[in-house]
Amino acid sequence: MPNALTRIALISDVHGNLTALRAVLDDIESRGIDRIVNLGDLIGKGPRCAEVVELARERCEAHVQGNWEASLTDPDRPAGDTVGDWWLDQLTEEQRKWLWELPFCHDFTMSGRNVRVFHASAQSVFHRVFSDRDEDEFLAMFANTEATGDGPLPDVVGYGDIHEPYLDSGVGDRVLFNVGSVGNNLYEPTPAYAIIEGVHGSAEAAPFAVQFVRVPYDVESEIAYARRTSMPAQGPWEVELRTGVYRGSQQG
Ligand SMILES: [Mn+2]
């Protein structure tokens, strides 16, 4: 009698976009999936960080820290560093502490594979790995580092940070994938997340799958909400949400 397959939804980079998060959570629920892991960057860029943090805490069984959490909620953040203050001010003291204490990675076993998820790379939440990285960067995603600790070496790695979903089984039997972004996708702006399916907690080989989902949502409603606030960088953010063109590539 085979073990039942479990599905886990992996979400990342919500970035304060509550309308997008609600749409994605509704889609996850409609599939009968009740296990969700958050890969970081709940906050920053968008208008509703506090609400997003609360909803994610309610619905996700595990979380890892993103670069926005790591830089903004650091209790030793340099006093002169005011970039991001608007977003930090949205959060309660308790939320800041919770975000600061989030773990770097989350490891588990599925269908005989060691799965590891983190925000950006095995090196650091600030070390960005794009989809066109070279083979050395690919392999480095599967290494144990000071940040990851000495857990079992992963065969499957999922991450966020670049706001662009992809899957690469480029070297050996390793699988690297990016879950995309819920609240701030680039290239194709529709919210994205991933589902992995397999026998959870099992060291025995069994079917294993990764699936990507795109969930349309009411982007204009999130933009209308943001316009009633004094959120910084609103213009470039609106272009990102509507077109997927990164603020650094937008024509002035
Ligand atoms: Mn991000």
Image: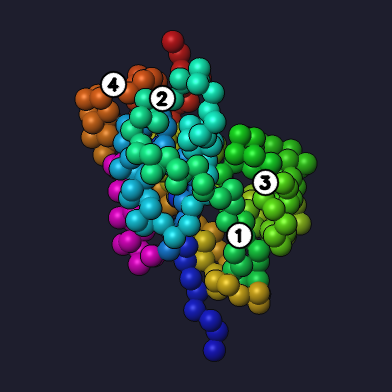
Under mark 3, the amino acid is: Ala
Q: Position of residue 141 (x, y in %)?
A: 69, 47
The answer to whether the residue bearing label 2 lies less than 8 angstroms from the nearest atom of ligand 1 is no
**Mark 4 nearby-residue class (10 Å; few <14, some 14–19, many ≥20):** few
Indicate which disc, 1 or 2, sits on the residue closer to the N terminus.
Answer: 2
Report the magenta residues as a range.
18-34
Indicate which disc, 1 or 4, sits on the residue closer to the N terminus.
Answer: 1
Indicate which disc, 3 or 4, sits on the residue closer to the N terminus.
Answer: 3
Label 1 to label 4: alpha-carbon separation = 39 Å
Indicate which disc, 3 or 1, sits on the residue closer to the N terminus.
Answer: 1
Q: Read off the residue under disc 1.
A: 107
- What residue do we see at 55% from left, 64% from top? 209
Q: Is residue 118 magenta?
A: no
Q: Read off the residue under disc 2.
A: 85
Under mark 1, the amino acid is: Asp
Q: Which mark is residue 81?
A: none
Residue 128: quadrant of the picture:
top right
Under mark 2, the amino acid is: Asp
Q: Single out the mark in the foreground, 2 or 4.
A: 2
Q: Secondary structure at mark 3?
A: loop
Q: In this rendering, would 18 be left or right of 224? A: right
Q: Between residue 221 and residue 126, name the one nearer to us.
A: 126
